[in-house]
Image (cartoon, helix red, strand yellow):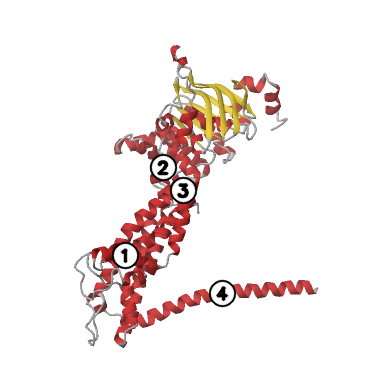
Amino acid sequence: MLMKTSEESRPTERAAGTATPWPADIKMRAAGLDFYYGGKQALYTVGLQVPTGRITALIGPSGCGKTTFLRILNRMYETVPQARPEGEVLLDGEDIFSLDVVSLRRRVGMVFQKPNPFPKSIFDNIAYGLRINGMGGQGTMAEAVEKSLKRAALWEEVKDQLHKSAYALSGGQQQRLCIARALAVEPEVLLLDEPCSALDPIATAKIEELLFNLKDICTMVIVTHNMQQAARAADFTGFFLMGRLIEFNKTAVIFKTPARKETEDYITGRFG
Amino acid sequence: MSFRTRWRKTVNVIMLSLTGLCALFTVSALFFILGYLVYYGGKSLNWAFFVNLPAPVGESGGGMANAIVGSGKLLLLASLVGVPIGLLGGVYLAEFGGWTFSFIVRYTTDLLNGVPSIVMGIFAYTIIVIPMKHFSAFAGGMALGVMMIPIAVRTTEESLRAVPGMLREGALALGASKWKTVATVVVPAAIRGIVTGIMLTLARVAGETAPLLFTAFSNHFWSSGWNQPIDTLPVMIYTYAVGPYDDWHRQAWAAGLVLLGLVLVANIGARLVVSRGISFRRV
């Protein structure tokens, strides 16, 4: 039923832009993107390019549409009845709305606001994505789990307790486990929805360092309420306000010389 | 102390004592029944009860081996009907249902739960026993199976609803389909609640007598198959308790104790099996 909604709302003229080759330094591109929850419009003609192998931060006050935008990129909005996008989002030049949703989410992984490990062992949490996607036998599975945990900088802490419950870990470890779980299926893009909002500063610093090191293997888009985090971690920053993308530029530019007054007001803490 | 304050305190004490008394009554009623059962049942219970067939009228001794096996067979049949339908129905209501259809299903399930068990017996009698022209274990099992459905559906639904939505999102975001998410993350996370619900309803139908009187009927010998009438512990308790012989009364007590024991053992066993999993509840 939800699938139908998105099918119907898909604009009819598509792939007109495929005549020119897709630039390698752009991973995803949204153009003229509107979004509705039932009759309520949440996004207005958002256009944004996600650069390959970089961290892009989305900032803005609560309810500005940044999380909504993030959840369009892997079509997670489809879990909400009556939710419907209009416009174009491309992944490597392919329209994400006509991709199979399973293969889209394989390529565009997601980490959530609160750590959400499955009630399974640490090993099974990481192996989950591989198993459901039919990747790897038993031998390669152990290797893949180790590789993902190492990438998420969690291996040293958990290598002796892989068969213990994921809930035995601390909040910060759980969030790194969730990142490892998302990395295990080797996504091209990783979406992070305020991944540190439930964590203390030390756990937050670990995750930021980890994201920095992940730039070699995937493109990241991170929603954050924490402006210092955006300034520290991101290469590019987009500022959302009331469903509109107000400004998008290199992080240094956004924080030092913003072009728009709204952006300046927000980052200097005058509102929001 | 003003009058109002004293009055408030008095009402407080009275109501507190009243609720306490009622709670105490509940507990003591249970322990009274249990104690009675263990005392009288225990006195009449012996090895012969588990291995022998019922003795002919006038002879003392004998057992209810056939009825123990019979109850087991009927519960197996009932589970084959009630567990899959209840489980999948509950999964539908919690995970897939649209609003209107779910409302109708939920409402009908609650109605079904309220149908008196004897009516369920008549139903099974009419659609199974009459066309087959004889009583059978099969008919009894079907009657009990249908009775299991409502509680199994609703407890499954409730257990699944208690699973945090963020676990579903986690699986969906990894590229799991809706069904895979439910089957590999949501149901395993809720398995304790689901199994508890199923054990509850199994325990309930294990003690049902009325729907068996004209479906499984009774058979004081070894039943040769699923297609034959069969003895069950509740029907034996009924028959023996109202019979004129002291020996029968003692056997009825013993049967009651055995029935309770079997339900308890099954319950504890199932809980041991599922408690090895990892719960989503953070303790």
Q: Are marks 2 and 3 in contact (CB under 8 Å)?
A: no
Q: Evaluate if marks 4 and 3 touch, with contact meaning CB atoms under 8 Å apart.
A: no
Say which label, 4 or 1, has the lower sequence index. 4
Tag 4: amino acid: Cys
Q: Which mark is in front, 4 or 3? A: 3
Q: Residue at point 65% right, 32% down? A: A61
**Disc marking residue B22:** 4
Q: Which residue is mark 1?
A: B126
In space, the residues marked 4 and 2 are separated at their CA atoms by 45 Å
- Label 4 marks which chain's residue? B
**Front position in the image: B195 or B78:** B78
Within 10 Å of disc 3 (Cα), the crowding (few <14, some 14-19, many 20+) is: few
Q: Position of residue A115 (x, y in %)?
A: 51, 41
Residue type at mark 2: give it.
Answer: Thr
Q: Secondary structure at mark 4?
A: helix
Precedes in sequence: disc 3 or disc 1: 3
Of mark 2 and mark 3, the one earlier in the sequence is: 3
- Secondary structure beneath dot 3 equals helix
Q: Earlier in the sequence, mark 2 or mark 1?
A: 1
Question: Could you say which quadrant of the image residue A108 lies in?
Answer: top left
Residue type at the position of mark 3: Phe
Mark with earlier residue (4, 2): 4
- Same chain for the residues at labels 4 and 2, yes or no? yes
Q: Do pointers 4 and 3 mark residues of a single chain?
A: yes
The chain holding disc 2 is: B
Callout 1 amino acid: Thr
Q: Is residue A259 left or right of residue A100?
A: right
Look at discs 2 and 1 and give the one toward the viewer: 1
Residue underneath mark 3: B101
User: Residue A227's spot in the image, x, y percent?
Assistant: 63, 30
Name the residue beneath numbered marker 2: B181
Q: Of residues A24 and A44, which is closer to you in this image? A: A44
